[in-house]
Image: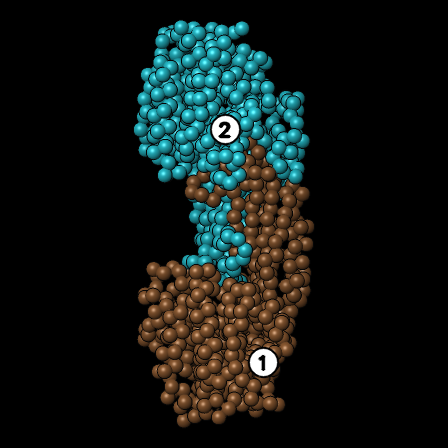
Chain colours: A cyan, B brown
Amino acid sequence: MDKLREHVERNKDRWLEELIELLKIPSISNDAERAGDMSRCAGRVQEMLSEIGMEAEVVPTGGHPIVYGERLKAPGRPTVLVYGHYDVQPPDPLDQWRHGPFEPTMEGEYLVARGSSDDKGQFHALLKGIETAIAVGGELPVNVKVLIEGEEEIGSPSLQPFIHEQRKRLACDAVLIADCSQFGIDMPAITYGLKGLVYLELIVRGPGKDLHSGSYGGSVANPANVLARMIAACQEPFGKVGIPGFYDDVRPLEAWEREEFARLPFDEEAFVKETGSPRAFGEEGYTTLERKWARPTFDVNGLVGGFTGKGAKTVLPAEARAKISMRLVPDQDPVKISRQARSFLEEIAPDTVQIEILDHHGARPVIVSREGKAVKAAVAAIERGFGRPPLFIREGGSIPVVNTFGEELGTDCLLLGLGLPDDNTHSPNERFRIVDYYRGMVAMAALLEELAR
Amino acid sequence: MDKLREHVERNKDRWLEELIELLKIPSISNDAERAGDMSRCAGRVQEMLSEIGMEAEVVPTGGHPIVYGERLKAPGRPTVLVYGHYDVQPPDPLDQWRHGPFEPTMEGEYLVARGSSDDKGQFHALLKGIETAIAVGGELPVNVKVLIEGEEEIGSPSLQPFIHEQRKRLACDAVLIADCSQFGIDMPAITYGLKGLVYLELIVRGPGKDLHSGSYGGSVANPANVLARMIAACQEPFGKVGIPGFYDDVRPLEAWEREEFARLPFDEEAFVKETGSPRAFGEEGYTTLERKWARPTFDVNGLVGGFTGKGAKTVLPAEARAKISMRLVPDQDPVKISRQARSFLEEIAPDTVQIEILDHHGARPVIVSREGKAVKAAVAAIERGFGRPPLFIREGGSIPVVNTFGEELGTDCLLLGLGLPDDNTHSPNERFRIVDYYRGMVAMAALLEELAR
């Protein structure tokens, strides 16, 4: 039996306990009242790094702290920078959880808790992989740096300045991120493409306060009516986005890539069933996988305005708001798309209302070459950890930090995923399959060995 | 000097004291803790009816009691039913009142207190008008029935069953309601038209739960995107409603009515300024007063779906909802309009989502002929009470009880208003102009005389 696997097997219960303790901390980065929990969580992560023999510190930022650690005991060998995040998504709607989001509970082969898959469970597996590599090999075969931030779910505002400032210290040959997912159960994968993101909030304001819709309806513009029309204008029939210029820089899918997507064991029926939607829907002329991974989208993420309680209240709302995200593909530029969207919205807004557009955050789309040394090492390591080679897949999500690492350190990112596509990462009852948590540790330890070859 | 006015003049201070005592009772119908105050208020109103020589009783209901009284001493003469309500709106926000909402205070020519205008002050003036008619004439010149309910501000749930059950006892030639308002200071009015109402809630459901908009965006339909398109489809350019058949039964404004609206001293600039909106907006081809009073509307009263907190969350929402009200004008039928709206929404809903439509409530639009005997009597009576004839105006709001009286008793309602449009009836510092309180008494006594002619 592989020594790495044996070491993991001997320590697994203790490590699971450690993960459970970490998941109990409600480290919700977008909730100002959780600042204390955020600090506590950062402190705990720093201790974990120290416990596996890394020089580690909690670095204060303008926002939530960053935890950084390093163990540089392999002169002349490559350096890998491991990235993760200890913050989690807000848990609402709370009433849809089967138990408290911060009361980790085993349900069959899954550990259920907010953050279990995204990302505490995943980065914890990488840390235990590092610990395993040290324990089995006596020392790390490569130099390892670890950076765990606390603002991933709110757009990582403090990370870019930190990486920029510390770019010499963070220099490395590869960045490893385990914040993606496998293609399916027992189908480990390397993600070579990510979508980019533009996230806007559109606020439409009309009257100075909510008015009686009987006395004022039809006399002044209703911001909720206007908002709906504006959002509708951003959508064309057949699933296309209606913002002028939106498709200008979209790199068409190549024939070989479409063939490769088509060969993947993707069960569309199961995928749709899992979402609970009546059927698939997207841009005409593309398969679901193509839409999901390689075609840009326009989604309203949230809508609110006027009376939202039970029953009826006849108000003409003072304002209505929509949160809108656009997922981008190579070679769309988030700055350009944001500008185009803003101009379009400003152009179509009637002068009977006032609008405001907030820019929440953005990210460039990413494509990683499959020919790099790190990718090849990862293929071998995954085969050792999971018993089969990885599939090459893309992601509909965005990982803005991948852009930052590319720009600041000139390094490609290796995007792995220990979780599964149906881990409910931003939904109630988030979960993480525990067998993959352990396989991930073995794969991580193996990766460090493979990178040293 | 008119004998009616003389009688009012002699008793005014005593009656104002009586009104002030009534206003001190916090008869807030939507507050379960005020049940005792509600009973006390009903009891006080019953005493007032008895004191002016009516046979009166407090009628228990499933909710708050109804007070009913009658004095039928004019055989062969017409019967008028006077309607009012003793319940009031909740007084919050309390911190915006200049003094306690239930501590009536004179401020210049206004009495400031919750309920002063809506509706205690108004129905009290009618009762004192009845008292005046008896005192001056020795007996009432017509038969009078009085119905004062305690649930107007919560949708009158007990009233319709009561009227239905007691329809023989309540039979009358005219119903008099003083719960509207004058057109402006020293501009008494008769409201001869009310809008009807259809209130629907549209729920669009897609995935079984909120999904990550990166992983699923572009693969399944987004209910918030769909909701916006559906709402947009209900609106045509230039302020028209886009539901097929919506205008079929709309009675066009006649030339004489448009001319009359145009002659009213309506200050559009002040009206728009008061709303806080950048400018007026409504159906093209109509003035603001025409839109407000006589053209049907489609208004989103509330919108909600997905993430509505601060900042950004990239979810593809499981559902999105809109509360939608349509204000109707003669001869639109709320049942037919509701059916048309429902069919249209069902027709345009894509099969990528499921929709549900809730029907909250409806009301028929009302137009009262100006040629009726009661209206003519009211014109003469108002001229006697206010020193000038009334304007004829319409209302954008609905008064559901008007439909109930029409359907159950087959009687038109005479809609008067002693208050002013800026009486803050549902806001802090509600007020009632005292000179109109006294003028209203004279007009009421005069109305009883005029009805007897």
Q: Where is residue A274 in the image (x, y as percent from the top left)?
A: 62, 32
Quadrant in the picture for the N terminus of chain B: bottom left
Q: Position of residue A179 (x, y in %)?
A: 48, 25
Subunit bearing disc 2 = A
Q: How would you rate the neighbour count of disc 1 (Cα within 10 Å): few for under 14, some for 14-19, many for 20 or more? A: many
Where, by quadrant of the figure, is residue A279 drawn? Answer: top right
Q: Total number of numbered labels?
A: 2
Residue nearest the viewer, comparing A423 with B65? B65
Q: Which mark is residue A105?
A: 2
- Label 1 amino acid? Ala
CB contact under 8 Å: marks 2 and 1: no
Q: At x 46% / y 64%, what residue is drawn?
A: B35
Tag 1 residue: B174
Q: At x 65% / y 30%, what residue is drawn?
A: A270
The answer to whether residue B24 is above or below residue B347 is below
Q: Position of residue A436 (x, y in %)?
A: 53, 19
The answer to whether residue B310 is above or below residue B245 is above
Residue nearest the viewer, comparing B324 with A90? A90
Residue A274, can we see it?
A: yes
Q: At x 36% / y 39%, what residue is drawn?
A: A33
Q: Position of residue A183 (x, y in %)?
A: 58, 23
Residue nearest the viewer, comparing A226 with A37? A37
- Asked if residue B344 lies left or right of residue A244, the reply is right
Q: At x 52% / y 36%, what residue is drawn?
A: A97
C-alpha separation, residue under disc 2 versus residue under disc 1? 69 Å
SS at circle 2: strand
SS at circle 1: strand
Quadrant in the picture for the C terminus of chain B: bottom right
- Asked if residue B389 lies left or right of residue A261, the reply is left
Where, by quadrant of the figure, is residue A19 drawn? Answer: top left
